[in-house]
Image (cartoon, rainbow, N blue to C red):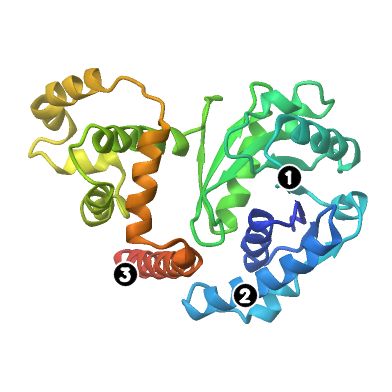
């Protein structure tokens, strides 16, 4: 059985602990700050209760949490670990330091994965003796609810390590995608960035309000995108499939793409968006709305799981 070491006990580290423990795997959680471990324990307990209430876990939360141990040192956390998920500060220097330490301590066969949301593994693993076992495992926040994880190797990562990481994430109930080679921002952030760029542009140029952009996604495109990707969407949106769709609408999208010059998000625009968002959601209600978001996400994931089971049989 794989033994999982989680390094960094913040929001993402706590969520990863939940992911692996609910899959039946033993987890050891470590943070350089002892108080972070105590906070993580409470966060994991609360998260498991919510997941259980939403029907996303059938096992008793206390039994899952019993699989999560805490360590008082990096050496203790890595001892016997076969897979390490790192979640420290999002800087190259911090990643270099922790990966150098982990590579020197961890069992030779252990995979070292980083949760970084945008720093390529090549920028912090190049000089490591064990660089062939290092990669990025970028989750979508929060990974205990949203299952996608991007597996991103460095140019020197062993393909066997990539496959082993992919299989482990899948076994843990996640939905891994393999990025074939490093690209800035990986896949999800680049897709989100393209949409955000156009959304900002449309608001800045006075075509639409930020509230109506949100409606266009949540009550339009997002409904389809919650169970289909963009290629399947267009394949189903024309009688002859994807080639037919591209023949019909390709010139339109090409013209739109030519108009979409890159723009910085300037202070005037940010001020306008901030005022519009605060009209929709006062700052003192943000935490309440975040809890609402997480509950809606859990409900959606539960619905998708149930629908998938019905389709299969």
Query: Measuring 40% from the left and 31% from the top, which residue is drawn there?
Result: 265
Q: Earlier in the sequence, mark 3 or mark 2?
A: 2
- Tell me the residue at 20%/52% (across/down): 220
Q: CA distance from mark 2 to mark 1?
A: 22 Å
Secondary element under disc 1, as helix, strand or loop, is loop
User: Image height check: is 38 above or below 190?
Assistant: below
Q: Does residue 152 appear in the picture of this structure?
A: yes
In the structure shown, which secondary structural element does the residue marked by tag 2 occupy? helix
The quadrant of the rendering that contains the C terminus is bottom left
User: Disc 1, disc 3: CB below 8 Å?
Assistant: no
Q: Position of residue 72 (x, y in %)?
A: 91, 59
Q: Position of residue 190 (x, y in %)?
A: 43, 32
Q: Residue at x 27, y 55 (%)?
A: 218
Q: Nearer the viewer, residue 176 or 163?
A: 176
> Which mark identifies residue 310?
3
Examine the image and state in which quarter residue 215 appears.
Answer: bottom left
Quarter holding the N terminus is bottom right
* Marks 2 and 1, the one that precedes in the sequence: 2
Q: Is residue 34 above or below residue 102?
A: below
Residue position for label 2:
46
Q: In the image, which is nearer the foreground, mark 1 or mark 3?
A: 1
SS at badge 3: helix
In 3D space, how far apart are the residues under numbered discs 3 and 2 (Cα atoms)?
A: 30 Å
x and y percent of residue 90 in the render? 67, 39
Determine whether, in the image, residue 102 is placed left or right of residue 46. right
Tag 3–tag 2 contact (CB < 8 Å): no
> What number is the disc on residue 259?
none
Q: Which residue is mark 1?
A: 88
| x 45%, y 39%: residue | 188
Q: Decide which of 191, 267 is in the foreground and name it.
A: 267
């Amino acid at each position: 059985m794989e033994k999982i070491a989680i390094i960094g006990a913040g929001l993402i580290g706590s969520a990863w602990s939940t992911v692996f423990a609910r899959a039946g795997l033993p987890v050891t959680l470590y943070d350089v700050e002892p108080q972070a471990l105590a906070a993580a324990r409470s966060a994991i307990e609360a998260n498991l209760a919510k997941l259980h209430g939403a029907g996303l876990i059938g096992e008793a939360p206390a039994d899952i949490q019993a699989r999560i141990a805490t360590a008082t040192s990096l050496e203790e956390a890595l001892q016997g670990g076969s897979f390490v998920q790192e979640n420290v500060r999002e800087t190259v220097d911090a990643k270099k330091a922790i990966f150098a330490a982990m590579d020197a301590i961890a069992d030779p066969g252990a995979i070292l994965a980083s949760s970084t949301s945008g720093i390529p593994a090549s920028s912090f693993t190049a000089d490591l003796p064990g660089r062939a076992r290092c990669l990025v495992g970028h989750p979508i926040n929060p990974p205990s609810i949203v299952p996608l994880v991007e597996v991103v190797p460095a140019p020197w990562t062993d393909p066997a390590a990539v496959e082993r990481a992919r299989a482990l994430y899948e076994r843990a109930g996640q939905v891994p995608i393999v990025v074939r080679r490093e690209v800035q921002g990986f896949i999800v952030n680049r897709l989100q960035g393209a949409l955000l760029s156009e959304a900002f542009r449309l608001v800045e140029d006075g075509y639409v309000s930020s509230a109506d952009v949100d409606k266009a996604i949540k009550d339009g495109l997002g409904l389809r995108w919650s169970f289909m990707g963009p290629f399947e969407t267009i394949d189903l949106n024309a009688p002859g499939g994807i080639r037919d769709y591209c023949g019909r609408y390709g010139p339109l999208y090409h013209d739109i793409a030519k108009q979409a010059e890159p723009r910085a998000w300037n202070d005037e625009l940010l001020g306008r968006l901030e005022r519009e968002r605060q009209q929709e959601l006062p700052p003192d209600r943000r935490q309440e709305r975040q809890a609402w978001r997480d509950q809606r996400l859990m409900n959606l994931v539960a619905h998708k799981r149930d629908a998938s089971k019905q389709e299969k049989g």
